[in-house]
C-alpha cells in the first residue's frame, strides 16, 4: 500500500489520506503518527471503503506518514465497533477511537518511566504546603503531576520536595507481565441450578460464537460464582475476558473475590489509574497477555487481542450510560462488541432492565435464571412504612418502626444500612427571615449543604463556597435553615437516637477511591461500624453477612421528576439495596419509608412480585410507544448567551423533518435550564422503532449551521431527561 486512509485523533476532522513512505509497512488498524499542518497527530489506518472521505486528494499532494507505533494493529472487530458506535450515537469516529487509544504513553512512551515517592525524610523547611503534600502522598508513587494532584498542591511544591530529598525518583516497572489466573485455583462446589447455568455459559465460551445471555438471579444467588466458571473456561482456552462493573467503587471487592477464586488479581482499568499503570495495562491487553480485565465502561473500547467473553455485571445500572462526550450505553455497546468479536456476552442482574427483558422475550438473548439465594440465606422480608400514618417526630426523618428496628439490630450486635440517595447535609438552605434560597450561580440547582466540610456545593458543576453565617440578602445573623435531609443529617439523627452506635457515612465524598472502598469493607468486616448511612454507592456488590437491616429513608425520591424509567429505577434501586440485607445465615429485614404505600411500585416491592410489576410497566411502555417499543433521541442546544441558544434551538425546531412515525417535541428550556454557566434548550425526538432516526437526524442537523459558541449535542436512547 503506498496510500493510506487515516482516522486521526481529532474529532473535528474526517479521515485523511497520506502517502506511506518507502520502507514503511502499514495495514488497516496500524497506529501511526501523521503530520497535520505543523503538528503531529496519532491516528489509525482504516479501510477506505469503511471510512469514505469527502476530500479526495491527488497522489502528488499527499504528505508522508511519519511513523508506525510499536503496538499491534487494532483488530477488525474493534474497527467495526468504532464505526458502529459513531454511527449509532451520532458521534465523530475520532471521538470513539480516542477511547480505544486511551493511553498515549502506551503507544508513544519510552519503555522506562520515572516515578516519584516519599523517602520518609522530613525536609528542614517544612511549609504547610509541603506538610500537606507529604501527608497526602503517604506511600503512594506516581509522576510529579500525579503526586501534585493527589496532594492538591502545585507541581513546584513536589519538585521542591525532590530537591530537599523528601521525595525520590524510582524507575517504574511498566512492561512486566501480569500473573496468569489459575482456573483451578479454588473452584466452589456449585448448586444444581448454578452448575447448569455455569455449564451453559462455559459451553458458549468454548463455541466461540456470539451468544448474548441474560443471567437473571436474585441478589446473593451466586451470579458471580456462575459467570466465574465462564471466565475459567475462557482462561483455559487462552482467551481474554472483560468484566464491566458500573462503578469504580466496586472494583476493590471484585479484585479480592477474583483473587480468592483464581489465585491472583485480574487487570483493573479505571480512571483512577496512574499513567504507568495505564500503559502497562493497555499494552498487556493489546498483546493478549492480560487474560482477564475488570473495569468501568471505558474498558470496553480497549484493543483486546482475542476477546473470548464479555460480562456486564449489574447490567441494569444506569451508570453504564455515558452522559458526556460520546453518549453511549456500555451495556448495549458491549453486546455489539460481542457480536463483532464473535464471543458470548453475559448480562448479569437481579433486576434486569425492561429493554433487556424485551430482548429475551423476542428470543434475541438467552436467559438463565437463578431463582433462590445460595445456601441457607433467604430473601429478606420487605415492609413499607406509611409516612403519613406513622410519621417521624417533628424535625426528624426516621419513622418509629424503623428507629425500633435500628435499636433492636444494634442490640443484637448486627449491622444496619440506611439508604438515601442524597449526599451532604441538606438539599436546600434558606433564610428564615427573608426566604432567600441559595442557588448555584452557574446552574438551575440549589446549593447542597455539606456540614462536614462547612460548605455549600453544587452537585452539577462542583461550584462550592463556605456556608455563610449571615444571609447575603437581608444580613440576618444565624437565620439560615437546612431543608430536607441528606446522608449527613440522617447520620446526625442516628447518633442522637442511638449514641452508642458507631455510624459511618458512605458516599462519593467519603469513598472516592478503590483504596477508600477497601478500607470501608475492612471496617465493616471487622464490625467497627454498626450503622452505615449511604447513597447508591452502597446499594450493590457488597456482601456483609452480619448486615441484617436495611432502611430506605425516602423511597419516593426516585419517582420525582417522573421520567419514563422512574418507577423501574425505584424498583431496581430498592431491590438492590434490599439485597444487602440478610446475605449470611441471619435473616434480613427491609423497611421502605414512603408517602405512597399504594403506588404500584411500592406494592410490588412489598409483595416481591417482580413479574407482575415488570408486566405492567412493559405494557405501559408499549402503550406510550416508549423504549423498547419506540425510540427517543434528545437534542440539547447550549450557549453562554441565552439568545444564542434560543435562536439555534428554534432554527433546529423549524427545520425538523416531517416524517410519518416521528414526532419532535420542543424546543423548550431544559429542566436544568442552566448548567455550568450555559443556557440549555431541549428537543425530544420520538420515533417508531423501525425508523432510522440516526439517518434522519444526521440529514436534518447536517443541513444546518450554527455559531461556534453554540453547542448541539445529540443523545440517542437518552436516560437523563434533564
Ligand atoms: P450475586 O452475584 O448473585 O449477588 P454472589 O455470587 O455474590 O451472588 O454470591 C453471594 C454469596 O454466596 C457470595 O459470598 C458467594 O461467595 C456465595 N456463594 C454463592 N454460590 C456459592 C457456592 N456455590 N459455593 C460457595 N459459596 C457460594
Ligand atoms: Zn452549579
Image (cartoon, helix red, strand yellow):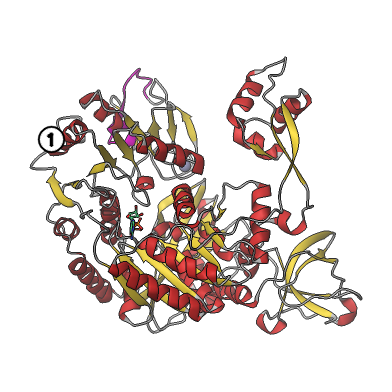
Q: Quadrant of the C terminus?
A: bottom left
- Across and down, in percent, residue 229 comes to 43, 66
Q: Is residue 191 left or right of residue 164?
A: left
Residues drawn in magenta: 474-490
Question: CB at mark 1 closer than 8 A to ligand 1?
Answer: no
Query: In the image, what residue occupies the spot 77% across and 53% down?
Result: 109
- Across and down, in percent, residue 306 comes to 60, 72
- Please tell me how many numbered marks the rendered image carries: 1
- Does residue 596 show up magenta in the picture? no
- The residue lying furthest to the top in this view is 124
Q: Quadrant of the N terminus?
A: bottom right
> Ligand 1 appears in which quadrant?
bottom left
Query: In the image, what residue occupies the spot 71% across and 33% down?
Result: 155
Up the image or down, 176 lies above or below 439; here it is: below
- Across and down, in percent, residue 532 comes to 31, 37
Up the image or down, 43 lies above or below 689; here it is: above
Q: Which residue is mark 1?
A: 400
- Does residue 482 show up magenta in the picture? yes
Q: Regarding mark 1 in the picture, which secondary structure is present there?
A: helix
Q: Is residue 598 left or right of residue 362?
A: left
Amino acid at each position: 500500500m503506498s496510500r493510506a486512509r487515516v482516522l486521526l485523533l481529532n474529532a473535528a476532522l474526517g479521515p485523511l489520506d497520506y502517502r506511506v513512505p518507502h520502507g514503511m509497512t502499514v495495514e488497516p488498524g496500524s497506529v501511526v503518527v501523521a503530520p497535520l499542518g505543523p503538528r503531529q497527530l496519532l491516528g489509525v489506518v482504516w479501510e477506505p471503503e469503511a471510512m469514505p472521505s469527502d476530500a479526495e486528494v491527488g497522489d502528488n499532494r499527499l504528505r508522508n506518514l511519519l511513523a508506525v507505533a510499536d503496538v499491534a494493529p487494532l483488530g477488525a472487530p474493534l474497527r467495526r465497533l468504532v464505526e458502529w458506535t459513531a454511527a449509532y450515537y451520532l458521534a465523530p469516529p475520532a471521538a470513539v477511537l480516542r477511547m480505544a487509544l486511551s493511553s498515549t504513553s502506551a503507544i508513544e512512551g519510552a519503555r522506562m518511566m520515572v516515578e516519584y515517592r516519599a523517602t520518609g525524610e522530613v525536609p528542614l523547611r517544612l511549609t504547610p504546603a509541603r506538610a500537606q503534600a507529604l501527608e497526602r502522598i503517604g506511600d503512594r508513587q506516581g509522576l510529579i503531576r500525579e503526586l501534585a494532584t493527589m496532594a492538591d498542591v502545585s507541581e513546584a511544591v513536589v519538585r521542591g520536595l525532590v530537591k530537599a530529598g523528601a521525595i525520590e525518583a524510582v524507575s517504574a516497572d511498566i512492561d512486566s507481565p501480569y500473573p496468569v489466573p489459575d482456573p483451578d485455583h479454588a473452584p466452589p462446589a456449585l448448586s444444581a441450578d448454578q452448575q447448569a447455568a455455569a455449564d451453559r455459559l462455559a459451553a458458549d465460551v468454548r463455541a466461540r460464537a456470539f451468544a448474548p445471555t441474560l443471567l437473571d438471579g436474585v441478589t446473593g444467588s451466586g451470579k458471580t460464582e456462575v459467570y466465574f466458571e465462564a471466565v475459567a473456561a475462557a482462561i483455559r482456552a487462552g482467551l481474554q475476558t472483560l468484566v464491566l462493573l458500573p462503578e469504580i467503587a466496586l472494583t476493590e471487592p471484585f479484585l479480592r473475590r477474583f483473587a480468592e477464586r483464581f489465585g491472583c488479581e485480574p487487570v483493573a482499568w479505571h480512571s483512577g489509574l496512574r499513567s504507568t499503570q495505564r500503559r502497562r495495562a493497555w499494552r498487556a491487553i493489546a498483546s493478549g497477555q492480560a487474560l482477564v480485565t475488570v473495569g468501568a465502561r471505558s474498558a470496553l473500547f480497549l484493543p483486546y487481542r482475542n476477546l473470548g467473553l464479555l460480562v456486564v455485571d449489574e447490567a441494569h445500572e444506569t451508570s453504564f450510560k455515558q452522559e458526556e462526550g460520546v453518549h453511549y450505553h456500555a451495556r448495549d455497546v458491549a453486546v455489539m462488541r460481542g457480536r463483532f468479536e464473535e464471543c458470548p456476552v453475559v448480562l448479569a442482574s437481579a433486576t434486569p432492565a425492561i429493554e433487556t427483558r424485551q430482548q429475551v422475550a423476542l428470543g434475541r438473548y438467552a436467559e438463565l435464571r437463578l431463582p433462590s439465594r445460595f445456601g441457607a440465606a433467604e430473601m429478606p422480608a420487605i415492609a413499607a412504612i406509611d409516612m403519613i400514618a406513622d410519621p417521624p417526630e417533628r424535625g426528624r426523618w426516621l419513622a418509629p418502626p424503623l428507629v425500633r428496628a435500628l435499636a433492636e439490630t444494634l442490640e443484637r450486635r448486627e449491622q444496619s444500612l440506611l439508604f438515601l440517595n442524597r449526599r451532604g447535609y441538606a438539599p436546600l438552605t434558606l433564610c428564615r427571615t427573608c426566604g432567600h434560597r441559595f442557588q448555584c450561580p452557574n446552574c438551575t440547582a440549589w446549593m447542597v449543604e455539606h456540614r462536614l466540610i462547612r460548605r455549600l456545593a453544587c452537585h452539577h458543576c462542583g461550584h462550592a463556597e463556605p456556608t455563610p453565617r449571615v444571609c447575603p440578602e437581608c444580613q440576618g445573623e444565624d437565620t439560615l435553615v437546612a431543608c430536607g435531609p441528606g446522608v449527613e443529617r440522617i447520620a446526625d439523627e442516628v447518633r442522637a437516637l442511638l449514641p452508642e452506635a458507631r455510624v459511618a457515612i458512605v458516599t462519593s465524598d467519603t469513598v472516592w477511591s478503590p483504596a477508600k472502598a477497601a478500607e470501608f469493607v475492612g471496617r465493616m468486616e471487622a464490625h467497627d461500624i454498626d450503622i452505615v448511612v449511604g447513597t447508591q454507592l452502597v446499594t450493590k456488590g457488597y456482601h456483609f453477612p452480619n448486615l441484617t437491616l436495611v432502611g430506605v429513608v425516602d423511597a419516593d425520591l426516585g419517582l420525582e421528576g417522573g421520567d419514563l424509567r422512574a418507577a423501574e429505577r425505584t424498583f431496581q434501586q430498592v431491590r438492590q439495596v434490599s439485597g444487602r440485607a440478610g446475605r449470611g445465615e441471619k435473616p434480613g429485614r427491609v423497611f421502605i419509608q414512603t408517602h405512597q404505600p399504594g403506588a404500584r411500585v411500592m406494592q410490588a416491592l412489598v409483595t416481591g412480585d417482580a413479574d407482575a410489576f415488570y408486566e405492567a410497566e412493559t405494557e405501559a411502555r408499549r402503550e406510550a410507544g416508549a423504549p423498547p417499543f419506540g425510540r427517543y433521541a434528545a437534542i440539547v442546544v447550549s450557549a453562554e448567551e441565552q439568545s444564542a441558544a434560543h435562536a439555534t434551538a428554534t432554527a433546529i425546531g423549524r427545520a425538523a423533518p416531517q416524517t410519518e412515525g416521528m414526532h419532535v417535541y420542543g424546543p423548550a428550556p431544559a429542566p436544568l435550564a442552566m448548567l455550568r454557566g450555559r443556557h440549555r434548550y431541549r428537543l425530544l425526538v420520538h420515533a417508531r422503532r423501525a425508523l432510522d432516526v440516526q439517518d434522519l437526524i444526521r440529514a436534518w442537523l447536517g443541513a444546518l449551521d450554527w455559531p461556534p459558541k453554540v453547542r448541539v449535542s445529540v443523545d440517542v436512547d437518552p436516560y437523563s431527561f434533564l
